[in-house]
Amino acid sequence: MTSPSTVQRPRTADLGDPLYYLKNMDTLVSWVAEHHGDLLTAGERAVLGQFFRLSTGARALLARMVMRSGEWFRADKLRYPELGVPESAALAELMGGGWLDAEPLLTLEQLFRLYTLGELRPVFADTLRAAGWPRAVPKGQMLEILQPRYTDPRRLADWLGASAAPVVRLQHMALFDRVRLMFFGNLRQSWSDFVLVELGHQRYEPVTFTPDSRAFQHRHEVDLYLAMHQCREWLDQGVPAAGVWPQLPGPSDNPWLASRRNRLLLELGRQAERQGEKELALQAFAASSHREARLKQLRLLERMKRHREAWAIATAWQAQPEPLNDAEAQGLARILKRLAARLQQPPPPAPPAVDIRADTLTLPKPASGSVEYVVTQHLWHDDAPVYYVENTLINGLFGLLCWPTIFAPMPGAFFHPFHVGPADLTREDFVRRREDAFEECFATLRDGRYRQRILETHRTRQGIVNPFVIWPVVTEALVELALECMPAADLECLFRRLLRNIREHRSGFPDLIRFLPGSTGPGKRYEMIEVKGPGDRLQDHQIRWLEFFAAEGIPARVCYVRWHDGEAPA
């Protein structure tokens, strides 16, 4: 097909160019045509070829219309001076090429979205008067009154007469949605997320795109995604879950699509439960493998007083070898405790108590600055430097060590060259699909190669975006100091917990870290410190990290701060 020349790593346009959005649109469409052309029909490829043969002005106007909401447009409202030609000339070319329907059918609701109250009131004045309504009713009320009387779509001239400002309908919108899906890997992102932003100010890790690494291997998988998206839109629009359930596509052997189906089943179950369709909700939760679905299934069974059924599911879940994440383990333990009491069963063993180290600092109240900054300044010594790192340091070290694994070209991970990180980063199977590669990373922690690997990655990838690395904070000096003072075994322990639930465990790390590079004593040469100012308290995810540190022998404590004015700590 005819298209602008493409390179392996396309560039986004400069926002200083008045037609930057068109150049970005060209890049996007070219990328899909090059990398997913086999998933398009011959007719669809022909349409995209015609897109590139349009004049610049017509193609720019079409891009503007594709980016806007809806498919119907008033021709007199399309005003884009950067086109370089009159809008009427661009419209004529698009209509002549079959891109626009010049006489579309309009429902009453579509008519009301396109025209003002002042334009509509004279047209329907007689109908309102005959129905006993005053001429000056508000627009929304007028639509409600007229809808039962005007149920069929009509052409614009039949609604408003031949003199009304013309309306055109954008053709091929379904194809543009398909292209958008294959580029972004979702329909949540709009064209504006790529076309109207300047991505060139960031550097992206080059990822090799091969047919095997694509999320969509077959056209029917794109169709499956679109069908699931339609089901989700119906749920969002208020269609009853019982009405959506029969339209739900069947299971897929594509792991990425299976994950999306699991999330859809979870949402359908939630809405069915809210709508009183409890059996349907149970069916949806049972069919979903989403991490939240089983807890919701058990809680619903409890509310329905089906305690033995819930007990059987809960005990089987507890016995399976795959470890649970923190939220699952906590939720399951609470359910088992309640069910055991109901059924006179032995209660599950309580987790061992863990003592969290804590102390209190009384300091002068500063005129400005955060409590973390004040504590950092107070604790700092030249031989024991303290850094305010919060979630950045451990995540950053992990990102540097495992960089090639994070950016491995796995199916469903990368769709285009402008990803900050893999699209499946927080999906349940992210680690499982890369397990061998992560184990190879951890092997370097045991044989000593990790230091060189982390520092070399820091030098060679400097400034390239990574979902774990915040470059302004994770400086080379901080990385070198951390590698000098933090044992490799501790790093592996922290990284493994991070991977157990990336969504939850990327946050909750203590605010500060203190290093003791010159220490020769038996203790470890670093300490993590969570700072809590007056009135502040530990959050659940922070408590879970602190309990983990205590159980694993990782030095950490909570520092409660109070000011000299006598205000008590939390």
Image (tube, rainbow, N blue to C red):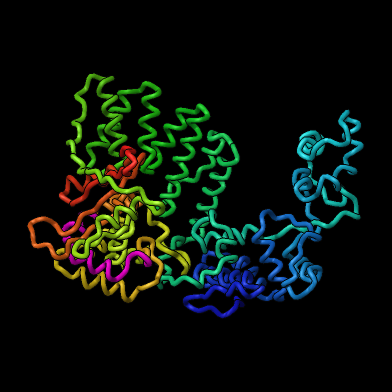
Q: Quadrant of the C terminus?
A: top left
Q: Position of residue 345 (x, y in %)?
A: 21, 22
Q: Position of residue 162 (x, y in %)?
A: 90, 54
Q: Nearer the viewer, residue 512 or 231?
A: 512
Please report the residue visible at 18 percent of the width from the left and 51 percent of the height from the top: 555
Q: Is residue 421 above or below residue 111?
A: below
Query: Does residue 236 appear anywhere in the picture?
Result: yes
Q: Nearer the viewer, residue 321 or 405?
A: 405
Q: Is residue 55 above or below residue 403?
A: below
Please report the residue visible at 37 percent of the width from the left and 27 percent of the height from the top: 301
Q: Start and end of the magenta stretch? A: 471-495
Please report the residue visible at 18 percent of the width from the left and 36 percent of the height from the top: 353
Please report the residue visible at 53 percent of the width from the left and 35 percent of the height from the top: 241
Predominant SS along the magenta part: helix
Q: Position of residue 562 (x, y in %)?
A: 31, 43
> Magenta span has 288?
no
Quarter assignment of residue 289: top left
Q: Quadrant of the N terminus?
A: bottom right
Quarter assignment of residue 152: top right
Q: Position of residue 356 (x, y in %)?
A: 21, 42
Image position of 569 (left or right of 418): left
> Magenta span has 473?
yes
Image position of 5 (left or right of 549): right
